[in-house]
């Protein structure tokens, strides 16, 4: 991780150690704290302590942000300020978080042809012998297949440590995740084989790497790197709009669609899916159920009121 450089760098370092010791430090939190650190460095004006002006300036909602994206950006700093307050290390007030909005984004429903074109493009990326190009060539086909076949969150894949991947048994331990919910994913045999081959190849370039998908000049790849590469590859062969996170949505809805004609072991399968995707409640998983009209109609018809007892009504927002 890049060292903090601002007036509050020592406090940020201690906070990261504190969070890391409990396994509660995520890549998203790191990104926000590093951004806050840069802002503090640029706007300190010779003051060597954290001021309310700096806090309010960085935490204010930006013109390009929705309420939800602002909340996501600000919350790690909100938590950091509470940490400082409890230890009487800063005399500032926590920022007011914008009201949560209902999610209106509709995930892309991938077609078989789109996915074939996308993964074929990943497999045929041009490259040179320079390390950044070769790293990209090796990583893109693997990381996006991992997202597609497991439903992992993109940052969970980016921040997988080498020891988190049990290649011998085909099991991944997800530790750095939303709501600190550690969970396990059992890989398909074909995905296990892909990871084995990747691990052998990437180990020649980074023999002492800590993370499974190492960055070129840092321990792991950043969010922008993954987002940019997905869009660049996707837009080169498809006219529709999609983002990397849509692979997670597709995993959830595709699995639920497979259960339409498989009787009433639905609830067991639903629980397995929820645990595998790292949801804190079944309420979050029902978001994917709501995206599958065919299953919704069949279940409503066969179970009537009992369905709502099994799966309480979900709020009209993206709860995960």
Image (tube, rainbow, N blue to C red):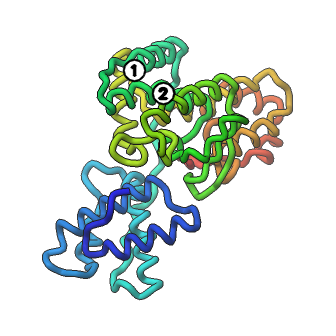
Q: Is residue 201 above or below residue 207?
A: above
**At x 78% / y 36%, what residue is drawn?**
269
Q: Is residue 55 left or right of residue 24?
A: left
**At x 34% / y 21%, what residue is drawn?**
235
Q: Residues within 10 Å of mark 2 (few under 14, many from 20)?
A: some
**Is residue 270 among the parts visible in the rendering?**
yes
Residue annotated with mark 2: 108
Q: Earlier in the sequence, mark 1 or mark 2?
A: 2
Circle 1/circle 2 CB separation < 8 Å? yes
> Residue 215: percent from the left, percent from the top?
39, 41
Q: Quadrant of the N terminus?
A: bottom left
> Residue 225: percent from the left, percent from the top?
35, 38
Q: Is residue 119 above or below residue 273?
A: above
**Is residue 107 among the parts visible in the rendering?**
no
**At x 43% / y 74%, what residue is drawn?**
14
Residue annotated with mark 1: 240
> Residue 297: percent from the left, percent from the top?
71, 28
Q: Is residue 115 left or right of residue 128?
A: right
């Amino acid at each position: 991780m890049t060292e903090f450089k601002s007036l509050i760098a020592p406090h940020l370092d201690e906070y990261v150690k504190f969070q890391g010791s409990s396994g509660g430090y995520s890549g998203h939190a790191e990104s926000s704290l590093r951004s806050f650190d840069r802002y503090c460095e640029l706007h300190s004006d010779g003051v060597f302590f954290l001021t309310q002006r700096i806090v309010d300036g960085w935490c204010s909602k930006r013109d390009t942000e929705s309420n939800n994206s602002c909340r996501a950006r600000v919350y790690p700093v909100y938590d950091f300020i509470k940490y400082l307050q409890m230890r009487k290390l800063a005399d500032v007030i926590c920022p007011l978080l914008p009201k949560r909005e209902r999610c209106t984004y509709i995930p892309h429903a991938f077609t078989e042809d789109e996915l074939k074109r996308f993964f074929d493009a990943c497999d045929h990326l041009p490259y040179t012998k320079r390390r950044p190009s070769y790293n990209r060539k090796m990583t893109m086909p693997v990381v996006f297949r991992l997202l597609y076949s497991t439903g992992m969150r993109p940052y969970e894949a980016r921040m997988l440590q080498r020891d988190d991947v049990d290649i011998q048994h085909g099991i991944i331990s997800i530790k750095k995740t939303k709501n600190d919910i550690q969970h396990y994913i059992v890989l398909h045999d074909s995905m296990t084989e892909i990871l084995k081959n990747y691990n052998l190849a990437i180990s020649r370039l980074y023999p002492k790497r800590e993370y499974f998908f190492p960055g070129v000049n840092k321990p792991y790849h950043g969010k922008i790197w993954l987002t940019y590469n997905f869009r660049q590859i996707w837009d080169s062969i498809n006219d529709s709009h999609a983002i990397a996170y849509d692979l997670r949505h597709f995993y959830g809805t595709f699995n639920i669609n497979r259960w339409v004609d498989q009787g009433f072991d639905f609830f067991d399968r639903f629980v397995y899916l929820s645990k595998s995707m790292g949801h804190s409640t079944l309420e979050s998983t029902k978001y994917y159920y709501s995206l599958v009209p065919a299953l919704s109609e069949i279940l409503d018809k066969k179970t009537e009121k009992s369905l709502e007892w099994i799966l309480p009504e979900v709020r009209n927002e993206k709860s995960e």
